[in-house]
Amino acid sequence: MTFEEAVIHRRSVRNYKEESIDEEVVKHCLQMATLAPNSSNMQLWEFYHITNPEVLKKLSVACLDQQAATTAQQLVVFVTRQDLHRTRERDMLKLETKNVQKNSPREKQEARIKRWQLYYGRVMPFLYARFFGVLGVIRKIMVNIVGLFRPIVYQVSESDMNVVVHKTCALAAQTFMLAMSSKGYDTCPMEGFDSKRAKRILKLPYGAQINMIISCGIRAKGGVWGDRMRIPFKEVYTRV
């Protein structure tokens, strides 16, 4: 399919055929999902590709036995991992240091490497750290003071940063669904699920959060509930 065809083809499918889908194709679509844009390239996500019938059944229960889950051939659980921020910061600092050494004039390398050391060595750890909301309050006070003198990002509380991580993960999930559509496969993003039960099933650590669970398969008759409806474009589009 062309990109436009894949976008038009993608629908939230709630009933799938009893027809298997290729696990390797789904895995490849998840590899495409890793190319999604994400905040500061931190990639604070993990993807759990569920093909085991027993785990599929358990997760279907966690998904409240909705038809999109019970008829799915496979499931993909998109998980945020803000608790891995220190590991990702070290990885990104190594990457950007190599990029500077490879692509920057020698006389500018030291200054640019120091900039990345500040960003991934101090700014990111400060923003992503959590401590019962206290650090977020401190950050909010600081940015409101600085904001009196220059433009600054105000969304720095612990809940704000949690939103950032989930937005990033959702971009990966959307990329995955479009990749699946381009292969002729169908998906349904589900947010109605028992997150505590699902975390226990997947044995996720405390710091992990489930962003959404996506069912996968090939749409059956009645799998799409009627015609697509969107608010008129003129009501949501503003040219400035």
Image (cartoon, rainbow, N blue to C red):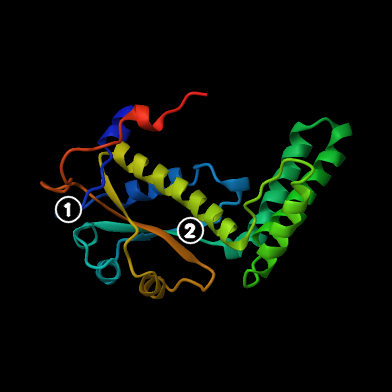
Q: Quadrant of the N terminus?
A: top left
Task: Name the one closer to the observer, 213 or 21.
Answer: 213
Q: Does residue 180 show up? A: yes
Asked whether the residues under the numbered discs 1 and 2 touch, taking CB atoms below 8 Å apart as contact, a structural biologist would say no
Residue at 40% in and 75% down: 200
Q: Is residue 126 visible?
A: no
Q: Is residue 38 above or below residue 49?
A: above
Task: Point out the residue furthest to the front here.
Answer: 148
Residue 150 location, x and y as percent? 77, 41
Which residue is at a point 28% across and 66% down the rendered structure image?
A: 63
Relative side of 84 to 34, left or right: right
Point 46% across, 60% down: residue? 79
Residue placed most toward the observer, 150 or 84: 150
Residue at which label 2 appears? 46
Residue at mark 1 to residue at mark 2: CA–CA distance: 26 Å
Identify which amino acid the numbered label 2 is placed on: Glu
Query: Could you say whether the residue bearing mark 2 is in a helix, strand or loop?
Result: strand
The foreground one among 235 and 164 is 235
Asked if 1 appears above or below 168 in the picture, the reply is above
Packing grade of label 1 (10 A; few <14, some 14-19, many >=20) is many
| Residue at mark 1 | 15
Percent coordinates x, y for residue 91 in the rendering: 67, 53
